[in-house]
């Protein structure tokens, strides 16, 4: 077992052994060996800065499987979001702003990797399948030939975290961007709890990948997403009203049909990293580790190609819009 030798490898190795927490070649090998799969990247972080009170700038204690921003930062962040964020000041700070684990779990629209943080696998789920009452719409920007799928749904966990999740080439750029009726500061709760998901490959991300360049195309996109979100919101409200009527007749208030409907569960194979569909009720909770051989649809193996999620859904919105915009 030896390291690859290149022109500058000797100098690089010397620098690593002298200036990093790794002091021997054996340690390098053992770090490589600790990577479970055939290939991968391991990132070591050390020399964490400490604040005046002696506490590290990253909180490792609150959750032993996470990197979190300490409370102080969190308070500052809240203030910051209140000032510049949504006019509705009430909502919580989304966990992705202070938890690396939470951020990594939604960083990719369709994860093609596995990320292990502090020895624990980041639970991966398809972002667009985590929602309740999912519907699709189609965005056709007039400045591009693309037809782009927009997924809307309700945040099943925390209603106060909502807005559009904007991806670019599979990577999250902007999260919880408020659009349409969500921007109204009035007491109405219009659009609260609605999450929209879109992959905006036709927009240009800013250099730090935390925002899009503020172009005309970007503003047009947000405007169009606002109208679509309003459509979706009306649809959901109507459906809820129908359910309530139905329940009044049935006298069965415990059944929330809207929450009960669920599509198939999508799971990622640990070996081939492809995503597979299993029937909705096959697992109560998504298993922590899973591979193609466990697929209840027999004869599944890693060599089978991944099933397309939405080839025909892409063509038309999944619901009938009665309220046409003027
Ligand atoms: Zn597989």
Image: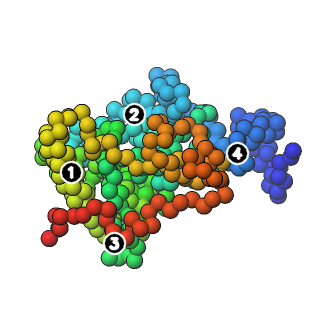
* Residue at position x 38%, y 29% in the image: 72
Q: CA distance from mark 1 to mark 4?
A: 46 Å
Residue count near mark 1 (Cα–Cα under 10 Å), binned few <14, some 14–19, many ≥20: some
Q: Which class describes the residues within 10 Å of circle 2: few (<14), some (14-19), or many (20+)? A: some
Does the rendering let one see residue 1? yes
Single out the residue that lies furthest toward the top. Answer: 53
Instruction: Give the residue displayed 34% in from the left and 35% down from the top.
Output: 76
Q: Earlier in the sequence, mark 1 or mark 4?
A: 4
Find numbered disc 2 in the image and state the secondary structure of the residue it sits on.
helix
Q: Which residue is mark 2?
A: 73
Q: CA distance from mark 2 to mark 3?
A: 40 Å
Q: CA distance from mark 4 to mark 3?
A: 40 Å
Q: Position of residue 30 (x, y in %)?
A: 77, 36
Please report whichever mark, 2 or 3, sits nearer to the chain's N-terminal start.
2
Query: Mark 2 vs ligand 1: CB under 8 Å?
Result: no
In this rendering, the label closer to the viewer, 1 or 4: 1
Q: Earlier in the sequence, mark 4 or mark 3?
A: 4
Q: Relative to 33, is 232 on the left or the right?
A: left
Instruction: Identify the residue at horizontal 58%, vertical 47% (top origin).
Output: 295
Q: Quadrant of the C terminus?
A: bottom left
Residue 13 position, x and y percent, is 79, 45
Which residue is pictured at 30% across the width and 47% down the height? 154
Q: Secondary structure at mark 3?
A: loop
> What residue does disc 3 label?
140
Q: Mark 3 or mark 1: name the one nearer the start of the chain.
A: 3
């Amino acid at each position: 077992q030896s390291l690859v030798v290149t022109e500058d490898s000797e100098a690089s190795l010397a620098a690593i052994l002298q200036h990093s927490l790794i002091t021997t070649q054996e340690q390098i090998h053992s770090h490589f060996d600790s990577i479970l799969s055939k290939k991968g990247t391991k990132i070591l972080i050390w020399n964490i800065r400490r604040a005046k009170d002696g506490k590290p700038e990253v909180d490792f204690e609150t959750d032993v499987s996470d990197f979190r921003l300490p409370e102080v930062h969190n308070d500052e962040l809240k203030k910051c979001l209140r000032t510049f964020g949504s006019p509705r000041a009430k909502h919580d700070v989304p966990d992705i702003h202070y938890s690396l684990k939470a951020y990594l779990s939604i960083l990719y629209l369709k994860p093609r990797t596995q990320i292990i943080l502090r020895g624990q696998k980041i639970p991966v789920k398809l972002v667009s399948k985590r929602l309740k009452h999912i519907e699709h719409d189609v965005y056709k920007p007039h400045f591009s030939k693309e037809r782009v799928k927009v997924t809307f749904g309700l945040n099943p966990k925390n209603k106060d975290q909502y807005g559009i999740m904007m991806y670019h080439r599979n990577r999250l750029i902007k999260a919880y961007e408020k659009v349409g009726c969500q921007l109204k500061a009035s007491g109405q709760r219009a659009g609260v709890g609605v999450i929209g998901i879109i992959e905006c490959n036709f927009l240009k991300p800013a250099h730090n990948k935390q925002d899009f360049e503020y172009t005309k195309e970007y503003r047009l996109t947000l405007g169009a997403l606002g109208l679509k979100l309003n459509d979706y919101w009306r649809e959901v409200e109507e459906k809820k009203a129908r359910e309530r009527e139905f329940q009044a007749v049935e006298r069965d208030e415990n059944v929330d049909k809207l929450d009960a409907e669920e599509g198939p569960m999508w799971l990622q194979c640990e070996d081939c990293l492809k995503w597979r569909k299993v029937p909705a009720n096959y697992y109560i909770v998504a298993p922590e580790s899973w591979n193609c051989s466990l697929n209840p649809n027999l004869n599944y193996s890693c060599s089978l190609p991944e099933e397309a999620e939405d080839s025909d859904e892409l063509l038309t919105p999944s619901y009938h819009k009665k309220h046409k915009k003027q």
